[in-house]
Amino acid sequence: MSSNPKRPSLNEWVRRVRDEEMPIFGQTVQRIISVAEDDVSSANQLAQVVLQDASMTARVLKLVNTTYYKTREQSISTISRAVVLLGFDTIRNMCLSISLVDAFVRGNARDHLTQELARAIHAAVQARAIAIERNDVEPEEVFIATLLYHIGDMAFWCFSEHQADELDALMQQGYSPEQAQDEVLGFRLHQLSGALAQEWRLSSLLREVLSRPAPRHQRARNIQLAHELARHAEAHGWQAPPTKQTIDQIAKLVGNPLEHTSEQLHQNARDAARIAGHFGAESAAQAIPLPKLYEDEALPEEEDEDHSQYPEPDGMLQLKILRELSQMLEGSHNFNMIIELVLEGIYRGVGMDRSLFALISPNRRELRGKFALGHDAPVLNEAFHFLKHPDQPNLFFDLLDRGEGIWYDPQHSTKLRARVSGAITRAMGGEAFFVAPLIVCGKRIGLIYADRTPSQRPLDEEAFEGFQLMVSQASMGLTHIAGSGR
């Protein structure tokens, strides 16, 4: 064992990864997990996590429209709709996967890291497909547990410096990975994976598999076989005996003929390479071993996209969202889903910095934010809380009484300025905004609000028209739902 007394302990490694190297990943994980574990969470809450990151939004929407995830012919244009159609688990795990890749592709570009990331993505795709064949009730849990199975290895190769060089040198001399880890680190990297899984409260399935070297239940066996397949295919090729032996074991696990299983696993490898690219791990995509049938297939090239912090107006996206809204009304969807889709249409389609729905209380004396999207959405939602007083002006309550939408500009809306109370100015930032009542069955139930205050971008007539159209569609859609008794 190494005689260096200053080498970091396992606990020190955990603290370093958590606090110094991957704090953003840890925070994202906790936000996503807290939403997914809350039974009363709406699609809006998960959508908020995704929409805070323009790059993640683009990649999630690209993924949901690939043949790997797509469940219908129509394209999915919004995160809210993606959550409804594919479910919390699928979108949550996409976000975790993208966050994981982002954390590592920005680190040291070591060959070992690329190989670990390639194996992880390849194995995760294989494990999910195997789980589906086995009629597993939660294949997405199997996917994420497989992806994170070697998270300690990936963290080490990404963030270590001299110790990584020492470990690599020993393995070049013929040491096994385990022997080299004992010598250089004093612990095994699978222990670091287990400790990080506990620290971040990752899936219980992952923690169970990491804590038991030889688990007996089929879900854990699924994860291990998927990693074994990815490792053998990389080291020996798809036609080598170790790889074929693993394929045979998988065929027995799922209860399918060997030839059918082999063909399916080959297709999964191709899917894994494509998905790695969509995750943003192009080097890992190139490192996933493809069967001979698919070796000459070119991976889809990633488009250079502008992932600016604030969405630009997109007329085509507005039309797609309106179409999705019409499709949603044909099904049995509820109030929240309609509101969430419309808010995303205003935010991403009209190109606003923030959009919000506020609900009026039954006694019509309290107006409180219920859903918000965009820049600092939780802060806006909390700030949007107003009480009606007879002797205090409040433009928002006026609008609910009058039933019309406005474009308020403090520089030009001189007649309205007196109705904008100090409370509104403090809460909204004192800049221009759009606001309109939401009318259901002739009753004004609340307001839709949107602005570009954070970015200081000017509002314009085209944006106001798009905003009004979205609010109008929301009112008609909710009236339709109310009238049909759903």
Image (spheres, rainbow, N blue to C red):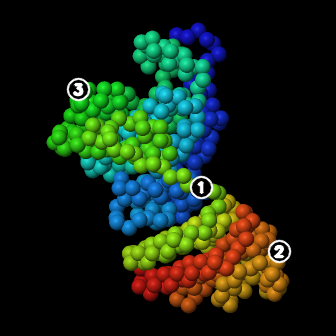
Residue 340 position, x and y percent, is 53, 69
Q: Name the residue under label 3.
A: 241
Q: Mark 1 points at which residue?
A: 307
Q: Which tag is nearer the camera, tag 3 or tag 1?
A: 1
**Mark drawn on residue 422:** 2
Q: Is mark 1 on a helix, strand or loop?
A: loop
Q: Which tag is nearer the camera, tag 2 or tag 1?
A: 1
As drawn, is 344 to the left or to the right of 239? right
- Rendered position, 422 above or below 206: below
Q: Spatial distance from mark 3 to mark 1, Cα to Cα?
A: 46 Å
As drawn, is 319 to the left or to the right of 69? right
Residue 389 position, x and y percent, is 78, 82
Is there any visible trace of residue 162 in the rendered image? yes
Q: Is mark 2 on a helix, strand or loop?
A: helix
Q: Spatial distance from mark 3 to mark 2, Cα to Cα?
A: 75 Å
Residue 446 position, x and y percent, is 62, 80
Residue at figure coordinates x 34%, y 64% from the top left: 72
The tag earlier along the polypeptide, 3 or 2, is 3
Name the quadrant containing residue 440.
Answer: bottom right
